[in-house]
Amino acid sequence: MSRPDETRPVRDEDAIDVAAVVGWLHQHADGEVPVGVPEVRQFPGGASNLTYLLRWPSADGEPRELILRRPPPGAKARGAHDMAREYLIQHALGPVYPYVAGMVALCRDESVLGSDFYVMERLPGLILRRDPPFELAPEAASRLCEDAWEALALLHEVEVSGVPELSSLGRGEGYVGRQVAGWTDRLGRAATDDLGDWRDVTTWLDDQQPRDSGQCLIHNDWRFDNLVLDADLRVTGVLDWEMATVGDPLMDLGGALAYWIQADDDAFFRDLRRQPTTVPGMWTRGQVVEWYCRRRGLAVTREAWRFYEAFGLFRLAVILQQIWYRYVLGQTHNPAYAGFGAAVRHLEQRTRRVVSGEARG
């Protein structure tokens, strides 16, 4: 299966000084970097950090390709878009988890691009987005689900205590409470005139929060468009470690399932999907929870799961609200963000239905 080129020309507002990057890489990269100025293109996926492809042509027809990641312009949530942290997590995780790209260099000199950035090897393979570029049979879709969630289960089983750079991410018990408080604070800091009143939701989340179900390395942004697949649709790589930390695995699962839009969801929610999770054979959210809990030996009732489901939807709404805030303030002009205000309002309604017990998200 060939990999389609999903990149596009770099948006004017996201342009980078390519010569400055290459000059810096030649002095600091871990490994050889080709001479000359590469072609630079931008990946359309993602609504947070910016991702670029650096491609050098080769005489043998196989170009050298590297990936550059840097923060977006404009105001940023406190602690977000930490390039050094994202780089160091992957660098430390490489020896103990098989699905991480090789790190090339981390730049903390803002005179090069105006912000920190890092460069890594490009993982070969296919990334599934909203609509797969081929027909996905139901049996293949189901098998893909199991492989993707198995990769998350394996991540949650990494022995972080044996890797100092990873274990240092943990802050001990109270992860759930810190997340409720932190995302509530982020929502307030990203308020726009059209933001609804979420106080009853945040109060419910604060009152209903459970004790931590465990402590492990969590990804915090688990989606198909952050997974690299081989020709047999097996996971070979995991991308976008910006929000990875040591925390509660069920919070990780709940956050991932907020993006897991299924075929029987309403039309507006289906239109928001970024993954092919509505095709026949894809598991439902309920099936994912059941499989994951059985795989990891966890006992979670449907009523207990309601908190994780509601928090996942709330957290997704805050993520979109933060981007909508930047769009409203004119800090980004990406047309892909023009509908994020309406998406936040829809997620507010879905979250309220889960909180009230009226429906599952």
Image (tube, grey):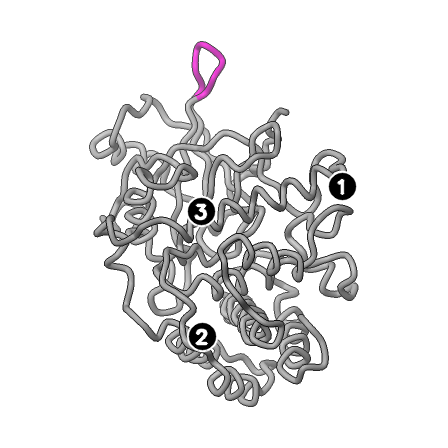
Dominant SS type (magenta):
loop
Q: Is residue 114 visible?
A: no
Q: Is residue 41 above or below residue 209?
A: above
Image coordinates for residue 299, horizontal then vertical, percent: 53, 66
Determine crowd level at label 3: few under 14, some 14-19, many 20+ residues with C-alpha closer than 10 A. Answer: few
| Residue 12 is covered by the magenta coloring | no
From the image, tell me which residue sits under label 3. Answer: 154
209 lies left or right of 276: left
Give whichever of 199, 40 is nearer the camera: 199
In the image, taking residue 89 as reference, residue 14 lies left or right, namely right
In percent of width and height, residue 351 lies at 63, 76
Image quarter (top left, top right, bottom left or bottom right) of the N terminus = top right
Q: Residue at x 46, y 44 (%)?
A: 239
Q: At x 30% / y 35%, what residue is drawn?
A: 104
The local crowd at label 2, few if under 14, some if 14 to 19, many if 20 or more residues have their Cα within 10 Å, is some
Residue tagged 2: 183
Position of residue 190 relative to residue 296, above or below, is below
Horizontal and vertical percent position of residue 254 = 54, 65
